[in-house]
Amino acid sequence: MAGTGSCIFCDIVAGNSEASVVYRDDLVTAFMDIRPVNSGHTLVIPNIHSTGLEKIDESTGGRMFSIACRISEAMPSAGIKREGLNLFLADGVIAGQTVFHAHLHVLPRHTGDPFAIDIERLERGIPSRTELDNQARVLAGMLARTRRR
């Protein structure tokens, strides 16, 4: 868990940079986002440097999600306004990733907040069942050949 000097999140895990830590264990660390969309916006990161999802082992990925769920559950009792919640993980520049250490945003949502996903813009039509079945078959075949660490 030593900081690299080039990754702010690794430095946070190593204790070499300031963070308002919510949770820490041997696999993950959760801390408040310094540029929150809404009050309570929290980041959950793997303690071992990983730029994206493909390098995160299943135990760590599962723990990230589990801790995000626990944080979400605790928010109302902590006085954080939460009518809904988004979990967001950007993997790669094209997806909007700006810090290249994987991180899961736990983003409390409420009416009138500034965060928006334009669902209507995302709707591009419904693919045929045949197309979906073909994609599922190919992806399932690749999953069967790929073992996670």
Image (spheres, helix red, strand yellow):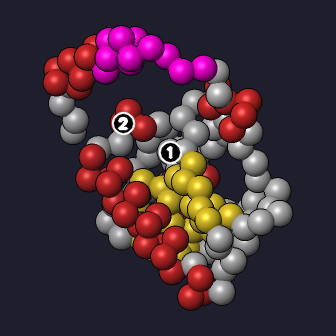
Q: Does the magenta-highlighted stretch encompass residue 128?
A: yes
Residue 19 visible to the viewer = no
**x and y percentages locating residue 10 in the rendered image:** 51, 53
The residue at 36%/11% (across/down) is: 130
Mark 1: which secondary structure? loop
Q: Does the magenta-highlighted stretch encompass residue 18?
A: no
- Three-letter residue code for mark 2: Lys
- The correct choice, above or below, for 3 with respect to 149 in the image is below
Q: Which residues are magenta?
A: 125-136
Please give left or right for residue 124 compared with residue 28 in the image: right
Q: Nearer the viewer, residue 47 or 65?
A: 65
- Three-letter residue code for mark 1: Ala
Q: Quadrant of the N terminus?
A: bottom left
Mark 2: which secondary structure? helix
Circle 1 sits on which residue? Answer: 102
**x and y percentages locating residue 54 in the rendered image:** 38, 33
Q: Nearer the viewer, residue 128 or 146?
A: 128
Residue 143 visible to the viewer = yes
Circle 2 sits on which residue? Answer: 55
- The correct choice, above or below, for 136 with respect to 103 in the image is above
The residue at 17%/20% (across/down) is: 145
Q: Nearer the viewer, residue 74 or 1?
A: 74
Mark 1 and mark 2 in contact? Answer it, CB < 8 Å: yes
**x and y percentages locating residue 56 in the rendered image:** 35, 42
- The correct choice, above or below, for 142 with respect to 103 in the image is above
